[in-house]
Structure formats: C-alpha cells, structure tokens
Image (cartoon, helix red, strand yellow):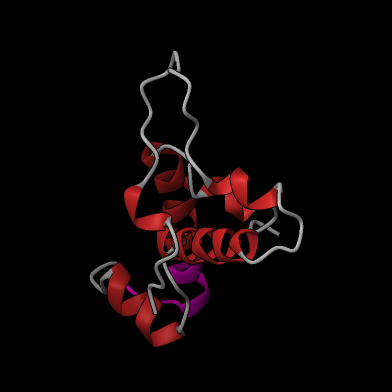
C-alpha cells in the first residue's frame, strides 16, 4: 500500500522518507522477533526486503525510463528539469536521468 505514488516519493525530503524507514525497520524487527542489537542492514538482508530509499530510487528510475520511451511526444518532457527559475531552491537529482542502478 505504501508504494502507491512511489514515483513521487523519489523527490521527497529525506526527513520524510526516514520516518517511513523507521516504521518499516521497527515493523520488520517485530515480525522477525529480532533483538535490538541486530543491525537494520542485516535485518533487511535476511528478510530480503529493500530499504525504503532504495525502493524509491529504483521506482523513480523505472518511471523516468518509461517516460523516455513513451509513444506520445509530449510525455518525455515530463522528466526534464524545468527551465524557469523556481521560488524553491530544490535541485533535481542528477543521477535519475536514464541510469540503471541494477
């Protein structure tokens, strides 16, 4: 259920994604009945569950690759950074454009 709109979560502030990561790690630790000293990395590796940020990143890359190959000529423009000056100082991630992380 949390993957609904995951392409947009790739642009989210890291402080917001850390909240989801904490919830996921606590839930996995509770389900696996692991003690506190088992690292989150080991917990995720043993259960085969990716970290939230990794899942956001992979889904965002797949989304932009799908946009680039779309048959409508207007759709690929959705994945290019805007040329107008924005009031907010956010930068587009430079590693998202057509790279495969696998």
Q: Pinpoint residue 90: horizontal percent, then vertical percent.
A: 38, 28
In the image shown, does 52 or 100 lie closer to the viewer?
A: 100
Q: Quadrant of the C terminus?
A: bottom left
Kindly give the residue lying farthest to the right in the view shown: 72
Indicate whether residue 59 is drawn in magenta.
Answer: no
61 lies above or below 78: below
Kindly give the residue lying farthest to the front in the view shown: 73
Q: Pinpoint residue 20: horizontal percent, then vertical percent.
A: 49, 50
Location of residue 38 by image quarter: bottom left
Location of residue 99 by image quarter: bottom left
Q: Which residues are magenta?
A: 28-35
Indicate whether residue 34 is drawn in magenta.
Answer: yes
In the image shown, does 68 or 43 lie closer to the viewer?
A: 68
Task: Name the residue rendered at 49%, 62% in the picture.
Answer: 61
Q: Quadrant of the N terminus?
A: bottom right
Would you say the magenta stretch is mainly helix, strand or loop? helix
Task: Name the residue rendered at 44%, 13% in the picture.
Answer: 87
């Amino acid at each position: 259920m949390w993957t609904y709109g995951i392409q947009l979560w790739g642009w989210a502030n890291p402080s917001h994604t850390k909240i989801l990561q904490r919830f996921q790690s606590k839930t996995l630790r509770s389900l696996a009945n692991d003690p506190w000293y088992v690292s989150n990395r080991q917990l995720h590796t043993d259960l085969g569950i990716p970290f939230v940020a990794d899942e956001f990143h992979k889904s965002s890359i797949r989304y932009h690759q799908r946009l680039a190959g779309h048959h409508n000529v207007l759709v690929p423009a959705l994945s290019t950074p805007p040329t107008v000056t924005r009031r907010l100082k956010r930068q587009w991630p430079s590693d998202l454009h057509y790279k495969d992380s696998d």
